[in-house]
């Protein structure tokens, strides 16, 4: 049934792309080929296919305006007739020769029953849609061998065990890179057109590989949105002052504005809370480092050594894994909840690998170091 349906659909496509009469010609040649293979053998297959190719080949078609008119081919169909017919004759020849030499095909003493039994398979091979309009061709024996073998693409995907947190982290990092490429288009083309009129729009987003501080990422990714929030929300609420309480309040209000700007969905709310937590962690880390922690470190290390340590920590590639995972994790897809379940919920409840939670914990420490 599948073979017949596949061949019927290909014939329908042939009627639309070429013409109904041309498709009927192909069907007649197919029946002549399988009948010749069943009744007469190899030599008859060569003679019949050779004669048909001589009469209806692309060269004969190009010089014979009566044939073109009889097949009712328009300019598009006439252009496709040559390659389609050439490859179809190759398949007809392989079909006839393979059937004439097949013990299974010749096992039935009744020629008519042989033709009827192999008609669906021969139609499926001759009019196989993926290569019907062109190359590559394949012999009928090879085609049937592959059709009878198990299809690897149809094998159900089997669960291979727990997901490695490192794989999830790399997937999230890659998603962030793709998002950055999208925003290069969103910001770059409008800026180019505006520059033709002398208007300079904000610079396009910075690449996530070159920014290690979460606060810097907010400043450098969407510079226009950052300017709006800074000038109209953060500074008026006292975020520019030295008071830690005012800074935290202004930061929370700024992220509240961004949450509304992005639609205030549940996924956006979780994303905003994660962003707010990480930015506040950087603010607190900066405050701590500028007071007691810096003095304690300077008692044991030189200033250059302290700077080198923080720089190396902040530049670790693992710091990129979850920054963008947190940023785009919950954007309305179940993938985000899957990642958080594997990397946070299951490890904390003792049902998953503690490795995932350690990745998150180390990520938080790197955020603190990046703030220095």
Image (cartoon, helix red, strand yellow):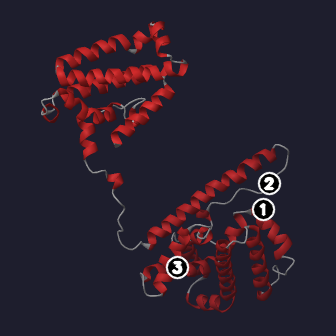
Horizontally, residue 64 falls left or right of residue 175, namely left
Residue placed under numbered mark 2 in the picture: 201
First reached walking from the N terminus: tag 1 or tag 3: 1
Toward the viewer: 289 or 174?
174
Q: Nearer the viewer, residue 22 or 239?
A: 22
| Marks 2 & 1, CB-CB < 8 Å contact | yes
Q: Is residue 168 left or right of residue 189?
A: left
Q: Which residue is mark 1?
A: 224
Alpha carbon distance from label 2 to label 1: 8 Å
Q: Position of residue 300 (x, y in %)?
A: 55, 89
Judge from the rendering whether residue 217 lies leftward or rightward of residue 21; answer left or right: right
Question: Crowdedness of circle 2 by 10 Å Cα count: few (<14), some, many (20+)?
Answer: some
Q: Is residue 98 visible?
A: no
Which quadrant does the N terminus fall into?
A: top left
Image x and y of residue 296, in percent = 61, 92
Give the alpha-carbon distance from disc 3 to disc 2, as whole Å: 36 Å
Q: Identify the image quadrant of the C terminus.
A: bottom right
Front-lying residue, 43 or 35: 35
User: Disc 3 designates what residue?
Assistant: 360
Residue under the image location 60 percent in, 78 percent down: 367
């Amino acid at each position: 049934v599948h073979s017949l349906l596949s061949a019927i659909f290909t014939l329908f496509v042939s009627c639309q792309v070429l013409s109904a009469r041309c498709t009927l010609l192909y069907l007649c040649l197919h029946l002549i080929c399988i009948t010749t293979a069943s009744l007469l053998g190899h030599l008859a297959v060569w003679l019949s296919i050779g004669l048909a190719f001589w009469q209806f080949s692309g060269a004969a078609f190009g010089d014979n305006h009566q044939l073109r008119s009889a097949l009712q081919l328009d300019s598009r169909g006439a252009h496709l007739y040559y390659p389609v017919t050439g490859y179809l004759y190759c398949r007809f020849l392989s079909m006839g020769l393979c059937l004439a030499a097949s013990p299974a095909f010749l096992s039935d003493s009744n020629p008519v029953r042989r033709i009827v039994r192999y008609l669906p398979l021969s139609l499926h091979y001759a009019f196989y849609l993926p290569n019907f309009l062109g190359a590559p061709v394949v012999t009928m024996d090879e085609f049937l061998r592959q059709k009878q073998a198990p299809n690897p693409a149809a094998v159900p995907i089997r669960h291979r065990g727990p997901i490695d947190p490192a794989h999830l982290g790399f997937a999230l990092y890659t998603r962030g890179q793709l998002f950055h490429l999208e925003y290069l288009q969103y910001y770059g083309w409008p800026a180019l057109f505006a520059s033709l009129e002398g208007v300079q729009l904000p610079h396009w987003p910075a690449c996530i590989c070159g920014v290690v501080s979460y606060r810097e990422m907010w400043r450098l990714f969407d510079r226009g949105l950052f300017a709006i929030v800074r000038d109209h929300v953060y500074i008026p609420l006292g975020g520019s002052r030295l008071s830690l309480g005012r800074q935290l309040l202004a930061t929370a209000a700024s992220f509240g504005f961004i949450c509304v700007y992005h639609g205030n969905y549940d996924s956006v709310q979780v994303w905003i809370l994660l962003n707010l937590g990480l930015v506040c962690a950087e603010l607190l880390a900066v405050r701590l480092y500028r007071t007691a922690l810096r003095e304690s470190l300077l008692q044991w290390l030189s200033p250059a050594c302290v700077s080198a340590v923080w720089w190396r920590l902040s530049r670790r590639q693992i710091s990129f894994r979850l920054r963008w995972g947190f940023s785009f994790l919950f954007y309305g897809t179940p993938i985000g909840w899957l990642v958080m379940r594997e990397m946070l919920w299951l490890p904390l409840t003792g049902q998953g690998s503690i490795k995932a939670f350690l990745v998150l914990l180390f990520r938080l420490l790197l955020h603190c170091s990046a703030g220095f």
